[in-house]
Amino acid sequence: MNVIFADMCLLLDISTYFTLQSSQVLLVILFSFSINDKSYKSYKMASASGVLIDQDCVTAANDLRFAKGSSKIKFVIFKITDDEQRVVVEESSPDTEYETFRQKLLSAVDKSGKSAPRYALYDVDYDLGEDGKRTKTIFISWVPQTSPIKLRMLYASTMEYLKKAVNMSVFIHADDQEDIEWEELVKTASGGKAK
């Protein structure tokens, strides 16, 4: 059975399943379970590196994007655990000072005290003049050039899976301090429209 057939069967109601041959029913149900498992538990999806995305990462990303009022957070910083098994939330904060956030990325270290990569989400507020004020969440992959090569490779091979798990499409890959200057974030968030 091909994937198109399985996709079509997912759109049919349960009574249609029983009109199919028994071997096809089994394959469709197993495929359907696999699809549901992946869509509802994408955080368990392993990256090419084998690193798992912790559910708290997805929860923190949703809190950043959808929370209102006093519970609203401004940024989330993620890291790969020292045992290199999972991506976890290192910190989330309502602090609106961008420089505080930036310094946290710049000062991140690994277990041996060397500069370390991090992933982050940041809510960028910008003004388009007559078109009004906007906010866009940006995914940041901070991989300083001074980090150990093995760690840089691990972060690079895990990035796409985390981006997918937290449902982010706008991102900055930064390996130098200038890459995470405020102006760069605003430029990326606004698609170059904000000044």
Image: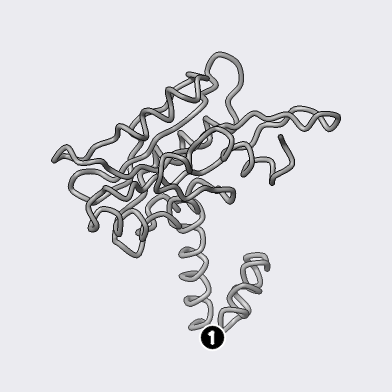
- Relative side of 68 to 24, left or right: right
| Residue type pointed to by label 1 | Met
Question: Which residue is rendered at x = 52% and y = 18% of the image?
Answer: 71
Image coloring type: one colour
Residue nearest the observer in this picture, 35 or 164: 164
Quadrant containing the N terminus is bottom right
Residue farthest along the left direction in this orientation: 112
Q: Which residue is mark 1?
A: 1
Which residue does the image show at 51% across and 63% down from the upper left?
35
- How far across and down, in percent of the image, does residue 14 sit? 62, 65
Assign a secondary structure to mark 1.
loop
Front-lying residue, 74 or 14: 74
Judge whether 55 appears above or below 101 on screen: below
Residue in front for this viewpoint, 114 or 20: 114
Residue 12 sits in quarter: bottom right
Closer to the camera, 47 or 187? Answer: 187
Question: Vertical placement of 135 versus 143: above or below?
Answer: above
Residue 19 higher or lower than 143, as above or below: below
Residue ranking furthest to the top: 70
Q: Position of residue 68 (x, y in %)?
A: 61, 21
**Image position, residue 178 (x, y; %):** 47, 40
**Residue, x 58% and y 76% (percent of image)?**
6
Quarter containing the C terminus = top right
